[in-house]
Amino acid sequence: IDVKRVEHALREAEKRSSGEIRVSVAPLFWGSVRKEAERAFVRLGMSRTKERNGVLFFVVPARRKFVVLGDEGIHAKVGQEFWEKVAAALSAKFRSGDFTGGLVDAIAVVGEQLARHFPHAGEADVNELPDHVDFGS
């Protein structure tokens, strides 16, 4: 994963929205990817945003698996079908081994929805969560 490209995509997506997007890359582990993603969501403070509009891309490259989790504020605006479309697009890129391209494209799509439903608040907007890629587990 090209961390610089992914972090640039995160900053670009967040410029237009009060929403927060994080990417967490996990080492190889066995067990439920979804449960581990939910733990990362809490560990990274994703549910502590003011408008509950955090989105986490949790990726396990060694298993070619990922989970996209949106907090209740953004989920209420876009619905399950949106997440399924994002996951389908990511899956296609991941299958071909293009993890960076998949993440960059998906971050842009999520960023568009965040900008639409949670526009940037100008000077009052606070970057509530860091924009760096997380490599915790």
Image (cartoon, grey):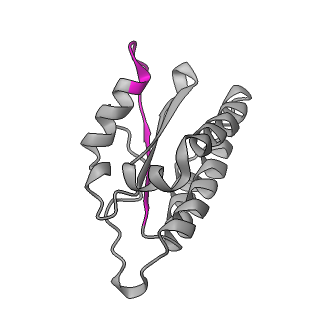
Compared across the picture, whether 50 is left or right of 85 comes to left
- Residue 128 seen in render: yes
**130 in relation to 88, above or below:** below
- Look at the image and give the residue range highlighted in magenta: 19-34
Of the 4 image quadrants, the one containing the N terminus is: top right
List x then y, in percent, for residue 128: 31, 65
Residue name at image x 55 percent, y 40 percent: 80
Q: Nearer the viewer, residue 117 or 29?
A: 117
Going by the picture, which residue comes out furthest to the bottom? 123
Of the 4 image quadrants, the one containing the C terminus is: top left
Residue name at image x 43 percent, y 85 percent: 122
Number of numbered callouts drawn: 0
List x then y, in percent, for residue 12: 56, 67
- Residue 1 seen in render: no
List x then y, in percent, for residue 103: 60, 45
Going by the picture, which residue comes out furthest to the top? 30
Residue name at image x 35 percent, y 59 percent: 130
**118 in relation to 29, above or below:** below
Compared across the picture, whether 56 is left or right of 43 comes to right
List x then y, in percent, for residue 64: 58, 24
